[in-house]
Amino acid sequence: MSQLKGQQKAEAKREEELKEEAEVVKKTLEDGKTIVDLTAKAGTDGRLFGSIPSKQIAQALEKQYGIKLDKRKIELREPIKMMGFINVPVKLHQDVTAKIRVHVVEK
């Protein structure tokens, strides 16, 4: 019984550490200076030829800021198909959600 309580206590502590780590990443992602810049080919009306999926956002975030994020945590309902600034939600922890600013410009 005491072993089970010890495991639960260790698990709760680990969960709290993961949440604190997610809060730190959230603060970095939502900093006004953290804007993920992406380039893509576009038509005259601002619509992209193709689209930008969450995988491309995750790769650009790691390349530009050194923040490694799993593409499955990026909650992009559908790939980005327009140029400009887009706020993309990211689920860092079950209790922590951040927003990444993505800036798409013409190539």
Image (cartoon, rainbow, N blue to C red):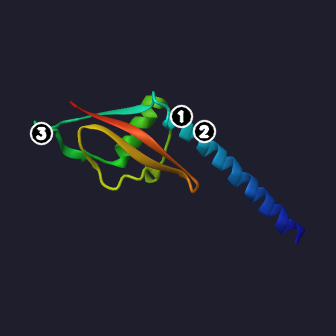
For mark 1, does the 10 Å Cα neighbourhood hold few (<14), some (14 to 19), or many (20 or more) residues? Answer: some
Q: Which residue is mark 2?
A: 24
In the foreground, 25 or 10: 25
Q: Where's the N terminus, which quadrant? A: bottom right
Q: Which residue type does callout 3 highlight?
A: Asp
- Disc number for residue 60: none
What kind of residue is marked 1?
Answer: Thr
CB under 8 Å between discs 1 and 2 = yes
At 46% from the left and 48% from the top, the residue drawn is 90
SS of the residue under disc 3: loop
Label 2 to label 3, Cα distance in Å? 38 Å
Quadrant in the picture for residue 77: bottom left
User: Badge 3: how crowded within 10 Å, few (<14), some, or many (20+)?
Assistant: few
Q: Which quarter of the figure has residue 106?
A: top left
In this image, 27 relative to 16: left or right?
left
Residue 23 lies, in percent from the top left, at: 60, 43
User: What residue is pinned by disc 3?
Assistant: 45
Dot 1 or dot 3: first in sequence order is 1
Cα distance between the residues tagged 1 and 2? 6 Å
Residue, disc 1: 28
Above or below, 17 against 46 in this view is below
Examine the rendered structure and indicate whether residue 97 appears above or below residue 2: above
